[in-house]
Amino acid sequence: AQKITQTQPGMFVQEKEAVTLDCTYDTSDQSYGLFWYKQPSSGEMIFLIYQGSYDEQNATEGRYSLNFQKARKSANLVISASQLGDSAMYFCAMKGDTGRRALTFGSGTRLQVQP
Amino acid sequence: DAGITQSPRHKVTETGTPVTLRCHQTENHRYMYWYRQDPGHGLRLIHYSYGVKDTDKGEVSDGYSVSRSKTEDFLLTLESATSSQTSVYFCAISDWGDTDTQYFGPGTRLTVL
């Protein structure tokens, strides 16, 4: 079984500062993928970034980067230079090495960016 | 953005009535999924499909059925809605590839009174 844990229900950050959202995972699969999604107040789920378990470098997508520490089973999302539009719920999710391809989600972190 | 639509976007119904939610995609992706989102639980998989007429259960499948007669459409049916099925329902799609990234529809808010 797979499990995703997000221990920060809510976080505040000042505009233009960097913020790290924590995600730890548990799986017995050798090959897996980790995802981050953003859910603004409008409700849609927006894909942000992906990290494969065999990727040697941390993934980056614009202001988003994923701090992947395989031995610690953590996949933290780092948002640099926060903007007011970054205020949203953020979900960490993982896909295991099965034919199902379904995602297991964490409970999310609500980020509020303050001016 | 992936071409995924869900209908209806909002629905209020009464306990015991049947409800069908529709997910439609224009991306010709092979895999389609239904999730529900409840406070404190993130998203949880209800059912998924790996091809036309090929479906399987997820972790919270009790009380739900699905059908996929065409690549582009994936239907979720609540045979007899209960108040515990009040939730936001998301459809997602993915295709073969290195990442199998899932792209989500806009969601359907269902209230069962």
Image (tube, rainbow, N blue to C red):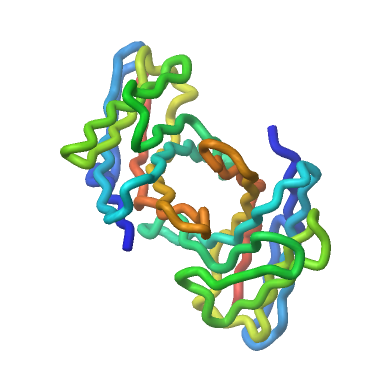
At horizontal 64% and vertical 49% (from top left) the residue drawn is B93
On the image, the x and y values in percent for residue A109 come to: 34, 42
Residue B8 visible from this viewpoint: no
User: Quick check: A15 above or below A74?
Assistant: above
**For residue A34, what is the image quadrant?**
top left
In the displayed structure image, the side of residue A113 where residue B6 appears, left or right: right
In the rendered image, the residue lying farthest to the left is A72
At horizontal 38% and vertical 59% (from top left) the residue drawn is B41
User: Quick check: B50 above or below A76?
Assistant: below
On the image, the x and y values in percent for residue A99 come to: 52, 58
Q: Depth check: give the residue in front, B91 or A54.
A: A54
In the displayed structure image, the side of residue A49 where residue B51 appears, left or right: right
Position of the C terminus of chain A, as image quadrant, is: top left
On the image, the x and y values in percent for residue A32 come to: 38, 45
Residue B3 visible from this viewpoint: yes
Q: Depth check: give the residue in front, A92 or A99.
A: A99
On the image, the x and y values in percent for residue B83 come to: 54, 79
User: Quick check: B113 above or below B53?
Assistant: below
